[in-house]
């Protein structure tokens, strides 16, 4: 079974034998794959008890951590790359987490669901209800996603914080989004993936 | 046997005495010319001897970690919750070894043993021990059992300190260290509690400067008091509140009554103290608490834990409990930080529990899941090469 498309792209951006910190690592799928294919050394941080158990069973280094309490235990530039997939929107202060990632890592990879996708937009426009789509499956009241952003929002934040965007990629799985996402990523991509540095 | 003991218990076990005649040079500079360790083992050592787990006990622990010594035993070993068939330390997969530490009072050479030079009990003259002395004696035990490398060394509290010391002293003889509710060194508050406990013992007239065995006395009151102090620090405020509240065991607050009032918690503590003082040696208590106080993982590595752990070759699992204020989660997080900075493999779980420091001994679903998940990894490594089990009965 192949891992998620965004994880495939991330994998291409990580140099072999890098020291990787994976924030909100889940069951350790990415780190496990990176260890197999890129011989990285790495640690995952996670808060969900079941995911931690799975990561341990996956032989991943997983450290129970509440990312909202900061990452001061990690020295500056102590990792080659700090990754956070699909978790920025769950953070209490996404911009502070991003700053911490850039302090700890020489480079960072961030992926997030693009709330600017036309499906989300039309859901709100036509139905007048908060979007519940294949990507965004929660109801407004029980969603862990408390800080949604669009591709344009994210780039505006990078601009404001003087964060350098080294690479970006957009993922869309459905038709026609898949074919035209490159033309207008903010409208057609499901997931945005950024490689960043200070 | 299964109809007498629970099915997931190792059942009836018999401890064995292992004698050593080669001298053990201790950290204090003195030498024990011969000594013995009281040891229990559970499960079977595989043919390539790759599935052995060393369990290191804590301050008041001993070799009897699991199972029952007789059908009349009311209580099983101290880690019965975690050791046994199908339990996190699965005796169907692992050969588990638990010695009583040197200096202990449950059959291993210690202050209540006879000093061969004087023909009298050692008492306070027994050499002071450090965690490294225990580790060294455990390594000799491994040699005796033909175990070149432990699949894992496991311990809670003072036992976790031994597991960490193992990782530094014998890096190539340990594949995993499981460090539970432990610390790289005690805090001043911790040392203070230990000193109060020691003073309680020493101020009992029956202590007789440590030579109570010669005088045929036992400092029961002092030891009971020491245990009561210790016990309070092993529990959480929340647990004591839930367990005892302000319930009375006897007496009443009604006006006009002068019967003495006793709270449940008072009676409980007294019972704990009394039970402990009748089967624990006061000099062992002093020795163990001193070893705890002196323990400082990084002292000889320039007080740099990263440098210390730089010597380790094994992988680590670190576990802490939320209401443990004697070995607080922050102490475990310091261990984890040092391990990450030293680029060592480490996983860390912070278990939610209202049971205080004692949580490491007690049932907790998540704790068991974490241990089970980690041990499945240890087991898969241990069985990389095909194993055939052999009986180890009498192999000590």
Image (cartoon, coloured by chain):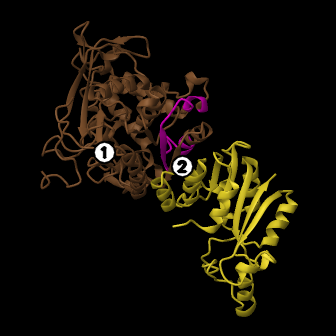
Chain colours: A yellow, B brown
Q: Does residue B326 lie above or below B39 as drawn?
A: below
Q: Does residue B262 lie above or below B100 as drawn?
A: below
- Cα separation, mark 2 vs mark 1, equals 26 Å
Q: Position of residue B54 (x, y in %)?
A: 34, 36
How crowded is the residue under tag 2: few (<14 C-alpha within 10 Å), some, or many (20+)? many
Question: What residue is shown with label 2?
Answer: A61
Badge 2 sits on which subunit?
A
Q: Quadrant of residue B202?
A: top left
Q: Position of residue B191 (x, y in %)?
A: 50, 30
**Do we see residue B116 in this rendering?**
yes
Foreground residue among B239 and B11: B11
Q: Position of residue B215 (x, y in %)?
A: 23, 15
Question: What residue is shown with label 1?
Answer: B386
Q: Position of residue B283 (x, y in %)?
A: 33, 22
SS assignment at label 1? loop
Q: Is residue B71 left or right of residue B321?
A: left
How crowded is the residue under tag 1: few (<14 C-alpha within 10 Å), some, or many (20+)? few
Q: Is residue B312 magenta?
A: yes
Q: Is residue B258 left or right of residue A11?
A: left
Q: Which residues are magenta?
A: B306-333
Residue at point 45% right, 48% down? B356
Q: Does residue A10 lie above or below A104 as drawn?
A: below
Residue at point 68% right, 84% down? A175
Total numbered circles? 2
**Do we see residue A86 in this rendering?**
no
Residue at point 73% right, 62% down? A94
Foreground residue among B37 and B199: B37
Badge 1 sits on which subunit?
B
Q: Quadrant of residue A196?
A: bottom right
């Amino acid at each position: 079974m192949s891992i998620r498309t965004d994880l495939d792209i991330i994998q291409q951006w990580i140099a072999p034998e890098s020291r990787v910190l994976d924030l909100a690592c889940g069951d350790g799928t990415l780190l496990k794959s990176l260890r197999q294919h890129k011989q990285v050394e790495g640690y995952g941080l996670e808060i969900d008890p079941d995911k931690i158990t799975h990561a341990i069973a996956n032989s991943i280094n997983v450290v129970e951590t509440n990312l909202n309490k900061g990452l001061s235990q990690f020295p500056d530039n102590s990792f080659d790359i700090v990754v956070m997939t699909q978790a920025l929107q769950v953070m209490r202060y996404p911009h502070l987490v991003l700053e911490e990632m850039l302090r700890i890592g020489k480079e960072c990879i961030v992926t997030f669901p693009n709330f600017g996708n036309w499906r989300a937009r039309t859901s709100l426009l036509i139905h007048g209800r908060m979007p519940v789509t294949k990507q965004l499956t929660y109801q407004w009241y029980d969603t862990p996603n408390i800080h949604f952003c669009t591709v344009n929002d994210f780039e505006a934040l990078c601009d404001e914080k003087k964060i350098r965007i080294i690479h970006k990629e957009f993922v869309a799985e459905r038709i026609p989004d898949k074919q035209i996402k490159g033309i207008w990523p903010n409208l057609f991509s499901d997931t945005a993936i950024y490689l960043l540095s200070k | 046997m299964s109809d007498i003991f629970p099915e997931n218990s190792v059942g009836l076990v018999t401890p064995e005495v292992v004698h050593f005649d080669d001298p053990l040079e201790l950290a204090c500079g003195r030498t024990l010319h011969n000594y013995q360790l009281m040891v229990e083992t559970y499960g079977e050592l595989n043919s390539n001897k790759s599935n052995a787990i060393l369990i290191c006990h804590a301050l008041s622990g001993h070799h009897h970690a699991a199972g029952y010594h007789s059908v009349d035993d009311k209580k099983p070993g101290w880690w019965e919750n975690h050791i046994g068939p199908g339990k996190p330390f699965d005796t169907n997969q692992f050969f588990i070894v638990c010695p009583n530490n040197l200096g202990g009072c449950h059959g291993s050479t210690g202050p209540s043993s006879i000093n061969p030079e004087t023909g009298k009990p050692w008492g306070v003259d027994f050499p002071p021990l450090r965690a490294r002395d225990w580790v060294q004696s455990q390594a000799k035990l491994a040699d005796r059992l033909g175990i070149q490398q432990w699949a894992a060394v496991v311990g809670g509290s003072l036992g976790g300190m031994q597991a960490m010391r193992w990782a530094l002293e014998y890096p190539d003889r340990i594949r995993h260290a499981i460090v539970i509710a432990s610390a790289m060194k005690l805090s001043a508050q911790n040392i203070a509690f230990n000193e109060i406990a020691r003073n309680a013992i020493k101020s009992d007239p029956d202590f007789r400067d440590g030579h109570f065995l010669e005088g045929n006395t036992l400092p029961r009151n002092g030891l009971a008091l020491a245990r009561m102090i210790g016990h309070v620090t092993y529990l959480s405020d929340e647990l004591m509140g839930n367990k005892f509240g302000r319930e009375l065991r006897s007496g009443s607050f009604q006006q006009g009554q002068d019967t003495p009032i006793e709270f449940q918690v008072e009676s409980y503590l007294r019972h704990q103290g009394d039970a402990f003082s009748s089967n624990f040696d006061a000099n062992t208590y002093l020795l163990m608490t001193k070893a705890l106080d002196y323990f400082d993982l990084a002292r000889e590595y320039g007080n740099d834990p990263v440098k210390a752990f730089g010597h380790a070759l094994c992988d680590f699992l670190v576990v802490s409990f939320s209401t443990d204020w004697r070995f607080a989660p922050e102490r475990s997080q310091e261990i984890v930080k040092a391990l990450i900075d030293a680029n060592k493999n480490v996983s860390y779980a912070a278990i939610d529990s209202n049971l205080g420091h004692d949580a490491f001994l007690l049932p907790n679903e998540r704790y068991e899941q974490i241990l089970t998940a980690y041990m499945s990894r240890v087991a898969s490594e241990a069985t990389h090469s095909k194993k055939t089990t052999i009986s180890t009965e009498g192999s000590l």
